[in-house]
Image: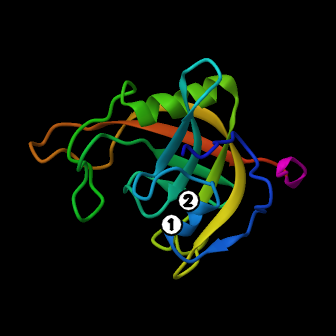
Amino acid sequence: MEIERVIGHIEGVTPGAVFHRRADVLRAKLHRTNQNGISWLIDEDGSKVGDAIVLHGGYEDDEDHGTWIRYTGASPGKDKSEDKKLLRSQSWTYEDNAALKLSYERKYPIRVIRGYKGDPRYSLPNDYRYDGLYEITAIRTAVSKSLAPDGSEIKICQFDLERLPDSSQG
């Protein structure tokens, strides 16, 4: 049975809600996968659009400033080393990045979940927390802080997100 997916506010889940495990985040319908940072759904026109992200210490190029985030996209398969450095460039054609990009273009809000491996200033030490709806305010192709294993530059898909005002949180 397919779980109904929602863009924006999930009825009954308020910002600040705490979840002990990633599976609990899935059950609350905040995110669709147990592994990926980017969640997407099929929009009314059949396109994949992003609906949520998890900040869980993903990449060295991520920045978390509480009410604004610089989020690095993704690549299929194993795409980073143990020290969070990317192994290869990312592409806007990869479905996760393309889905978030389309949400930016359609001005859809994104649910942000902070995991315990995220920035300790904003993340809980052992749990996941739903931190509300954010708007993607800018996207860009950037160059990663580190080089690929072969010494070449790594191009990354980046998203800037800003938290929506409390009055927009559902």
- In reply to whether residue 11 is colored magenta, the answer given is no
Looking at the image, is 98 positioned above or below residue 82? above
Neighbours of disc 1 within 10 Å: few (<14), some (14-19), many (20+):
some
Q: CA distance from mark 2 to mark 1?
A: 5 Å
Pointer 1: what residue? 23
Residues in magenta, as a range: 166-170
Q: Which residue appears at 41% of the width and 31% of the height?
A: 95
Residues marked 2 and 1 touching at CB (< 8 Å): yes
Looking at the image, is 35 positioned above or below residue 110? below
Q: Which residue appears at 54% of the width and 22% of the height?
A: 47
* Front residue of 6 and 115: 6
State the image coordinates of residue 126 (x, y, percent, origin top left): 52, 81
Pointer 2: what residue? 26
State the image coordinates of residue 85 (x, y, percent, origin top left): 27, 55
Amino acid under label 2?
Leu
Query: From this viewpoint, which residue is outermost toward the top?
Result: 45
The secondary structure type at the circle numbered 1 is helix
- Which quarter of the picture shows residue 5? top right
Give the colour scheme shown.
Answer: rainbow
Give the side of residue 165 with respect to residue 76, left or right. right
Neighbours of disc 2 within 10 Å: few (<14), some (14-19), many (20+):
some
**Which numbered disc covers residue 81?**
none
